[in-house]
Image (cartoon, rainbow, N blue to C red):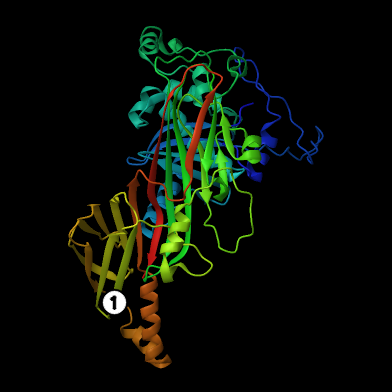
């Protein structure tokens, strides 16, 4: 069997593995076959018993849809046939409602019997339904990995491409799922079983019809010593490059104080190495990593022992690991320290934080500051925002985008910015302010003039007068101020935030010396400013 999930220290992945273990793949020349499985704690009923056996958990139906035209690109059923029209209507109606409320979810219940899981990538939406007890993370992870596999095969995943290569698409679904349970989701192993479409395959398909598509009848575990890497890989120039991408999640108050913060990171690898190399990667300040998940190629025991990421890389671009960094507190007990320790950005931020740093909390090192002011009246309001960069960061902050979410009773808004472009979305009740590059001579400022609807007139005004006018005004002011949020996105190239850096990268088991390189990126994940 092949594990379709990145390995992590979670109980959900272990449960999926235990359920997937009994599945046995049959010969591909004669079709797929499975054997009956007796799950622990479940006794199969007698042949004359009216009680039906409990179905194994898995995906019942899969729909691939164009979310722009809401047209069906592909569908496949592993369980009872589900009417696709009713499912698609429910999913897109829920999606439109979530867009209006700025709340996005990947799971919904339809008619109380089915659970729908859906993710959107570009113009394609992947929808999976299940009627049995199923691990939600398994389904969401499979849909995510399905898009990765399709991009590895077709480069661009659009409705036209999927219709052109629909035979390859259904062959991939047959290899990736067995009775609705994921069994093989690695592009390297799938490319051995289902060759990617190329000029030769297209010519054979035109001459011989769909029989021209070649499919191997051998077991991928016999062809590949490692599911994620094929044999006899050769490159004229061997190279490996890493991208350390970190995103900041933080919540700030109107005075700029950090209420909650976290840093999430991802290490992307672009490997073009010949043979079967073995790589050891050392990270600085790795003791700050609180949560992590790895590519299946990573040896977990080695990382748990000495915090070294040891793996045989997959060919091409893949995600090596994702992690979450915790801010070090001053009163933390002494912990194990790695061999090399460098002063990280958390400590520097705490030293330079001044009064906002606090005695026990460490601030997230945000590269920019946002200072909002909001005032509201009965029929008019005003929101002013000043945004600038902090001098502590040497690299420039680029692609800054601020989304100011306004109260629901806003009738119209007139934004004006001293720098950048500001537009008002009437449907979403928010103003988007885009600053490509900060000027050197002035600080950008955004001013929004609001026209408000008075919801406290007529009947509401009488009820408020009976209870006391002062309490009603205070309640209205607090309610409106809580509904004004500022969501910030930004990008900083060439610098990391958490202090996690690549110390050494060693390639063993091969005689060549590859070209190496590491790039660091900092992005705004979910930065919210409460006014």
Whether residue 105 is visible = no
* Image point (32%, 64%), residue name: 370
Q: Name the foreground residue: 220 vs 166.
A: 220
* Image point (25%, 54%), residue name: 434
Q: Which residue is mark 1?
A: 375
Q: Looking at the image, is 328 positioned above or below residue 355?
A: above
Q: From the viewer's perspective, tell me whether residue 19 is left or right of residue 451.
A: right
Position in image of residue 199 (x %, y %): 35, 12
Mark 1 surroundings within 10 Å by alpha-carbon count, few (fewer than 14), some (14 through 19), many (20 or more): some
On the rendered image, what quadrant is the N terminus found in? Answer: top right
Position in image of residue 338 (x %, y %): 59, 44
Q: Name the foreground residue: 84 vs 322.
A: 322
Q: Name the foreground residue: 349 vs 138.
A: 349
Position in image of residue 468 (x %, y %): 40, 92
Position in image of residue 521 (x %, y %): 38, 44
Whether residue 55 is visible = yes
SS class of the residue under badge 1?
strand
Q: From the viewer's perspective, tell me whether residue 455 is left or right of residue 447.
A: right
On the rendered image, what quadrant is the C terminus found in? Answer: bottom left
Q: Looking at the image, is 211 positioned above or below residue 468?
A: above
Q: From the viewer's perspective, tell me whether residue 374 is left or right of residue 352.
A: left
**Count of numbered tags:** 1
């Amino acid at each position: 069997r092949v594990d379709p999930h990145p390995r992590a220290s979670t109980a959900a992945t272990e449960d999926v593995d235990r359920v997937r273990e009994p599945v046995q793949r049959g010969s591909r020349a004669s079709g797929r076959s499975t054997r009956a499985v007796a799950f622990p704690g479940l006794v199969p009923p007698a042949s004359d018993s009216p009680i039906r056996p409990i179905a194994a958990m898995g995906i019942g139906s899969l729909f691939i849809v164009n979310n722009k035209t809401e047209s069906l690109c592909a569908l496949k059923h592993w369980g009872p046939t589900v009417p696709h029209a009713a499912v698609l209507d429910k999913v897109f109606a829920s999606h439109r409602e979530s867009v209006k409320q700025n709340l996005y979810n990947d799971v919904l219940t339809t008619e109380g019997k089915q659970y729908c899981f859906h993710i959107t990538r570009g113009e394609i939406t992947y929808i999976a339904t299940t009627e049995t007890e199923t691990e939600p993370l398994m389904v969401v992870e499979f849909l995510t990995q399905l898009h990765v596999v399709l991009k590895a095969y077709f480069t661009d995943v659009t409705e036209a491409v999927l219709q052109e290569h629909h035979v390859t698409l259904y062959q991939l679904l047959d290899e990736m799922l067995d009775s609705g349970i994921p069994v093989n989701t690695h592009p390297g192993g799938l490319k051995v079983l289902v060759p990617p479409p190329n000029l030769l395959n297209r010519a054979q398909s035109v001459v011989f019809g769909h029989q021209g598509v070649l499919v191997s009848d051998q077991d991928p575990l016999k062809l590949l010593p490692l599911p994620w890497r094929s044999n006899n890989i050769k490159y004229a120039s061997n190279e490996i490059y890493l991208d350390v991408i970190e995103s900041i999640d933080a919540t700030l108050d109107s005075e700029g104080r950090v209420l909650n913060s976290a840093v999430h990171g991802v290490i992307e690898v672009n490997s073009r190495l010949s043979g079967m190399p073995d790589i050891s990667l050392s990270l600085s300040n790795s003791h700050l990593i609180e949560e992590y998940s790895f590519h299946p190629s990573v040896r977990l025991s080695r990382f748990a022992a000495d915090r070294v990421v040891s793996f045989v890389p997959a060919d091409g671009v893949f995600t090596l690991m994702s992690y979450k960094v915790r801010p070090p507190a001053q009163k933390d007990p002494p912990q194990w320290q790695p061999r090399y320790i460098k002063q990280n950005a958390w400590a520097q931020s705490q030293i330079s934080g001044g009064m906002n740093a606090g005695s026990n909390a460490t601030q997230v090192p945000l590269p920019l500051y946002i200072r909002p002011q909001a005032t509201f009246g009965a029929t008019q309001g005003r929101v002013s925002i000043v945004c600038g960069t902090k001098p502590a960061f040497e690299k420039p902050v680029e692609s800054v985008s601020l989304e100011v979410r306004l109260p629901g009773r806003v009738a119209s808004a007139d934004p004006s910015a001293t720098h950048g472009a500001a537009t008002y979305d009437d449907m979403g009740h928010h103003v988007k302010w885009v600053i490509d590059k900060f000027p050197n001579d002035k600080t950008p400022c955004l001013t929004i003039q609001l026209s408000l609807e008075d919801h406290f007139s007529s009947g509401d005004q009488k009820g408020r007068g009976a209870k006391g006018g002062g309490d009603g005004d205070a309640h209205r002011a607090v309610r409106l101020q809580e509904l004004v949020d500022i969501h910030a996105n930004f990008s900083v190239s060439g610098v990391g935030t958490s202090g996690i850096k690549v110390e050494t990268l060693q390639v063993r088991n091969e005689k060549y010396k590859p070209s190496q390189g590491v790039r660091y990126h900092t992005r705004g994940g979910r930065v919210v400013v409460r006014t």
